[in-house]
Structures are given as structure tokens and as C-alpha cells.
Amino acid sequence: MTHDLTRERLAAGLGFALASAASFGLSGSLAKGLLEVGWSAGAATLIRVAIAAAVLIVPAIIAVRGRTHLVRRAWKIIVAYGVFAVAGAQLFYFLAVGYLDVSVALLIEYTAPVAVVLWLWLRHGHRPTPLTVGGAAIAAFGLAMLLNVFGGGQISIIGVLWALGAMVGASVYFIISGDEGNGLPPITLAAGGLLVALVVLAAAGLAGILPMRFSTGTVSFVQFDAPWWTVAIALGVITAAVAYVTGIAATRRLGARLGSFVALTEVMAATAFAWLLLGQVPAPVQAAGALLILVGVVVVKLGERPAATVVESMTEEPTRTDPPAPVPV
């Protein structure tokens, strides 16, 4: 029975993770359409977060009805999620692309799974297996191929620092999303984080850090044209509201480590949507990179500790004087 439950949890986690990756992956193509009609990156991000927060706020309140103490107890987690995982990751990434090629900035940000592995090892003692390390290396090489960065690009130290900030934000996203100990429903954590991010991004816009330019032009894609407001709604509902809720649900089932590697499929989804909506046909090396990412994710999964071992480690008497670290499941 335990084995069946574990398989069901894994299947559900992978389903949520792929849905989240596809939703996040659509954001680039939709935002690109808005940028081409005069929107700034900051404006697109702000409207995305604002719409998502508006969509989720009522369901989030209903989800904790009668349990508002959970929100009061976890307010620091919600603030950290909004500042780092939502606002920080996006803001730092947009600042990074002002100094680096987009592919280079993405490559640095998507080293987040490696940072998650190191955090779980150093902070909680979850030492990675050789298969986990090998899978990380395979996935990283595949990511570099998919982003087609081997042709080189201009490297700016300032840009690298901003991209590393985005990587930290993405790492915080996976670590907090995988924590079931706070008791917050995924939709409540997502809504709270989006509200915090909305305040942070609005403040950045008012301070002039994030330029805000809006436009009411028609957005053109390869197969169709769309009014700006329909693209903005899709950007907020699909690529933020749905993406964050399913991402949290996925990481709570897969754990921060495996969840972060499965999330690399977001780059594959982004490439596919750019092909369909923008006509950006991927090169053969990018297709090979996508395959290597899948191989890397499978190897990382094979390197995960078996469920039985996890259960045994949770029930055994600790031999150390400090309390055992929580094990993500």
C-alpha cells in the first residue's frame, strides 16, 4: 500500500510539475508579444502578478477559512516567497538581460537545481548520491545546448551578479514550495507571495528601477492576432496563477531537489511555444539539449533515496544531539 501511495504521489507530482513548467514556459512568448507593441518588461511583469493575485485571493481566503492562524504563523515564509521567489527572481532576471545575452542569463538562473542540492546537503545533511550528481551534470549540459550558448556571448560581471540573484530567487521558490511543514495550502501560499511581489514590483516601478510602459496595440503572433488585454489576462491567469499553484503542489510531492530538476522542462516548453507562437524554430543542437535534460531528470530521479529508506530514517532514533532535519517527500 505504501508503495502504491508513493507511486501515486510521484505521478501526481510529475503531472503538476509538467503543467507548471508548461504554464511558466508560455510566459516568454506572451510577454514578447506585449514588448513588441511597446510594453516594458516591468509593465508586463507587474500586470502579470497583479492579475494572478486578483484571481487567487478569494480562493486563497476560502482555503484557510477557519485556519487563519496558519497565515499568521507563516507570514515570514509568505513574505520571503513573495520577495525572493516571485518578485526577486523576475526583477533580477530582467536586470540581468540588460547586461547579458538572454541565453546566458537563463543558463545562470537555471543553475538553481544545483543550489538546491547543495542547500539540502549543507543545511539538512541530505547528501546527493553519485546518480544525482551525474544527472545534474547531464541536465546542465543539456540546458546549455538547449539555450545554444556555446557560440559565446558578452559577459558582464554586473549582469552575472544580477543573474545569480535570479538564481537565488528560483532556489528559494523550490525550497519554500517543497516545505509542507507550514501547513499553508498551495493556493494560499501562491496568493500571499503574489500580493507581496505586487507591492515590491510597484515600489520598484515608482522608484524608477523597473521602467513601466504600457500600450493598447494589437499583439501579432505567427498564426493569429490578439487584443493586448487578452494576452495580459493569459499572462496573469495561465503563466502566473496556474503556474505558481501547480508548481507548489508539484514540489510538495516531489521534494525540492527532484522538483527543481523537473522544472527544467520549462525551458523546453518555452522553446516549443516560441516555435508555435513566434516562429522561432529550434536548431538541432537545441533538440539534442532537450533530450539530454530529460535524461538528466531521469538519472536524478534514479538517484533519489527509496521511499522505504526515507521512512526508516524518519522512525529511527537519532544518533546526534541535534534534532533530525525534515525530509522532503
Image (cartoon, rainbow, N blue to C red):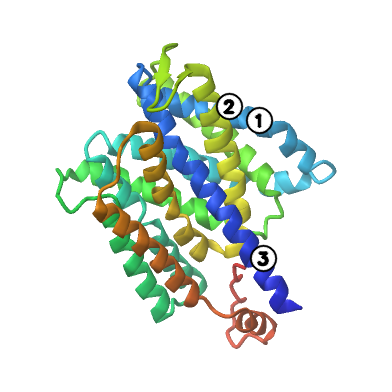
The residue identified by callout 2 is 51
Nearer to me, 233 or 156: 233
Q: Which mark is residue 9?
A: 3
Q: Secondary structure at mark 3?
A: helix
Q: Amino acid at mark 1?
A: Val
Nearer to me, 240 or 145: 145
Q: Amino acid at mark 2?
A: Ile
Nearer to me, 239 or 126: 239
Q: Residue furthest front?
A: 223
Nearer to me, 291 or 228: 291
Q: What residue do we see at 52% from left, 37% from top? A: 239
Q: Amino acid at mark 3?
A: Arg
Q: For the residues carrying marks 3 and 1, which lies nearer the camera in this image? A: 3
The C terminus lies in which quarter of the figure? bottom right
Q: Which mark is residue 55?
A: 1
Please give the count of numbered marks on the rendered protein.
3
User: Which callout, 3 or 1, points at the residue further toward the start of the chain?
Assistant: 3
Q: Is residue 268 above or below residue 59?
A: below
Q: Spatial distance from mark 3 to mark 1, Cα to Cα? A: 27 Å
Residue 177, image x and y in percent?
A: 58, 54
Residue 10, image x and y in percent?
A: 62, 66
